[in-house]
Amino acid sequence: MVLPDLHGRADLLAAAVARYPEAHFLSLGDAIDRGRQNMETVAGLLRLRAEGRATLLMGNHERMAQEGPHWYREYLGTHDLGAYRRAMEGFQSWMRAGGDTVRQELGGLTLEQFPALLDEYLADLGRVVYVTGDGQIHSEAPPADVPSVLVAHAAPPVAHEQHRNPLSAALWLRPFEGPFPLPPGVVYSLHGHTPVRTPTRLNRHLYVDLGAYETGRLALVEIGNPRNLPEITVLCGRGSPELAQRYPRFGEPVPVHPVELVPSAAAPAPVPPRLGRP
């Protein structure tokens, strides 16, 4: 069961787990910042992984969050002021892109006192996986005669003029920068990163980020036979779904099954859209 960008919506993660208590969840990344339940979201994902019930991928927001702590540890080991400068620049870049909501949630956030739970989450995240019809998740592309679905945060891992490293491209590229070639045997690819009004297919790429942190809508993608489109359930929780009207419209919509969640007084109000890097 693929989970696109949660962005701190622990309530929607809990609803997904409650609805599919036996599922193995594949997180597309961007589970942190922008929303108001970041640490609870991280704790929930780590708990699922410890139980053998989740595979966690990196999003561009996790990549940004890694930069400051990485270079700060480098500085502590070398006392290189260049490393310290890069740590400060990376940390501030993440703050502007959404990390400030994590700081607000914690009542403060510095590189000197970076939360151990968040550090644990950021330390071990995949980039690209392949799902076959038997439900197995592979870190490498299966043989060409075995149909599979490529799953990555933003795009397939391709060399691009802005991202020479294909694994970096998989975190950042947008649909308008494709279409992207797929390895032999891959029927289609599945991504978050670019918010869409409804799950959308463009060529052989499927985009399912519905802007959960502000719209309250989370797509759950059940990959079955790779030769068929997946079954998609959209959880409709607390949020402002009308904000999706500002998301780009492209490609063709795919069928979904909407599920209205019972409103909860404990559910957080959506955070207003922030300026900064998407």
Image: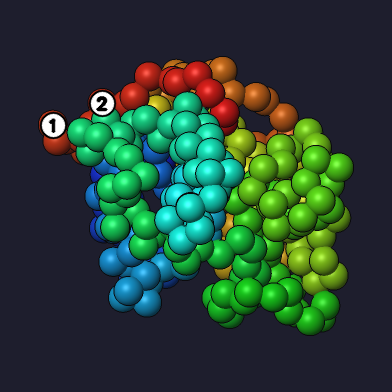
Q: What's the residue type where badge 2 is placed? A: Ala
Find residue 242 and report its horizontal and vertical position in percent.
44, 18
Residue 162, located in which quarter of the rendered image? top right
Which residue does the image show at 82% across and 78% down from the upper left?
Answer: 144
Dot 1 alpha-carbon crowd within 10 angstroms: few under 14, some 14 to 19, many 20 or more: few
Q: How is the image coloured?
A: rainbow
Residue closer to the observer: 121 or 13 = 121
- Seen at 77% across and 51% down, the residue is 204
Residue 230 shown left or right of residue 125 in the figure: right
Residues at marks 1 and 2, CA–CA distance in whole angstroms: 9 Å
Q: Is residue 250 left or right of residue 151?
A: right
Which residue is disc 1 drawn over? 265
Q: How far across and down, in percent of the image, does residue 182 sit?
A: 82, 60
Asked which secondary structure carries label 1, the reply is loop
Residue of label 2:
269
The three-letter amino acid code for the residue at tag 1 is: Ala
The answer to whether residue 183 of the structure is visible from this angle is yes
In the rendered structure, find residue 2 and report the number of the disc placed on it.
none
Quarter in which the C terminus is drawn: top right
Vertical position of residue 268 compared to residue 63: above or below: above
Which is more foreground, mark 1 or mark 2? 2
The residue sitting at 44% across, 20% down in the picture is 273
Q: Is residue 20 visible?
A: no
State if disc 2 and disc 1 touch (CB < 8 Å): no
**Relative image position of residue 201 (x, y in whole percent):** 70, 43
Left or right, residue 266 beside residue 149: left
Where disc 2 sits, the SS reads loop
| Front position in the image: 277 or 129 | 277
Going 41% across and 35% down the picture, which residue do you hit? 99
Q: Nearer the viewer, residue 141 or 76?
A: 76
